[in-house]
Amino acid sequence: MGKKIWNGLLLLLNAILAFMLLFACLVPHISAETLPALSLFSLLVPFMVLANIAFVIYWVIQFKKAFLWSTISLVIAFFFIGSFYQFRPEKPIPAQEGLSLLSYNTRLFNKYQWSTDPNIAAQIINFVNHSAAQIVAFQEFDVSHKNAFPSFPYVHISAADNSQQAVQAIFSKYPIVNSGSVSFPSSTNTAIFADIQVGVAVVRIYNVHLQSLRFSPNKVSSLNEEKRERLYKRLKVSFAKQQQQAALVAAHMKQSPHKVLLCGDFNTNQFSSVYYEIKGDFKDSFRESGYGFGKTLDFPYFPMRIDYILADPSLDFMYHKNYHISLSDHFPILATVRL
């Protein structure tokens, strides 16, 4: 009797989690501006996937047909929202072929000493200068380091100093022939672009930093109920702003006279409506050429991918790599695209 009750409770929980995963397939098509809470829901998708996999294993061991519930949900989710794990071996970076871009939220090069390591800025500079990148998109750039990258002589920076906004920067080994920005109302975040001459072709590079959530996931468990409620309200506002900003970027991209490559920190994962608003029919470097979980946020509990490199659908990614170096709260990503 005890086992029947236990299995009955597990079956109920399984049904709930299977339904939640199916509902997650709809989330990318519901604007976070309409229902901001769904952006929080999308963050739970990796947990839902792992839980449903666990149920499949459990019911198979028990020789129960209940394994079909989660199996069907997982198959549907795979086709609608994709996998958050890529089952392909790591590839070597292509030699002398294609255009390589690096996207990196540097957390201001540790300007305000979040880390006790005094050499963070020097290590970031060394990493970038020795990378294979030909174009670098920095989010949260410290303007005082604008002369630290002599091998990237062409530069577009969103502001002259760090006093008014979260500064974005594009550094290039190829000439920048035009540049500009996409302003976000009522926000210190922004997006910038640069038209870059690569041989006979001109490509437009966007560097996007969507609305920051301004909270540490590690500290949520220590908040009391009142503070959690305030945090939840603030997050809803941030997610709604992200959706508005994503729409502005997507509209601007559609007007580009050149093929587009986009780098950036979206501050939300690949299962959200914000991600899909910008991605549209563009290719995602991790999905095309990455491997593993593609983790870009230094978060201890589960792999979070919130930084992306996207490309015009007519372009092909040849390579993607996540660098797990703990010099910021984000990990840098590099991708190579064939123009």
Image (tube, rainbow, N blue to C red):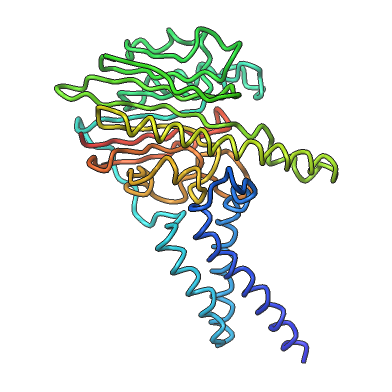
Front in this rendered view, residue 310 or 59: 310
The quadrant in which residue 323 appears is: top left
Looking at the image, the residue that sits furthest to the front is: 34
Q: Is residue 94 left or right of residue 62?
A: left
Of 318 and 158, nearer the camera is: 158
- Specify the quadrant of the image occupied by residue 154: top left
Count of marks, rendered view: 0
For image coordinates 34% across by 26% down, the residue present is 205
Q: Quadrant of the C terminus?
A: top left
Image-quadrant location for residue 59: bottom right
76 shown above or below 266: below
Q: Position of residue 310 (x, y in %)?
A: 36, 38
- The residue nearer to you, when weighing 289 against 237, is 237
What residue appears at the point 51 percent right and 33 percent down from the top-left corner? 245
Residue at x 48% of width, y 53% of height: 29
Q: Residue at x 78, y 88 (%)?
A: 2
Q: Quadrant of the N terminus?
A: bottom right
Please determine whether, in this image, residue 54 is positioned above or below residue 231: below
Q: Position of residue 114 (x, y in %)?
A: 66, 24
Q: Residue furthest bottom?
A: 1
Along the viewing direction, whichever of 61 and 179 lies nearer the viewer: 179
What percent of the width, then of the height, locates residue 216?
Answer: 69, 36
75 lies left or right of 319 = right
Report x, y in % for residue 206.
38, 27
Q: Is residue 91 above or below residue 145?
A: below
Q: Along the horizontal axis of the image, is 65 left or right of 259? A: right
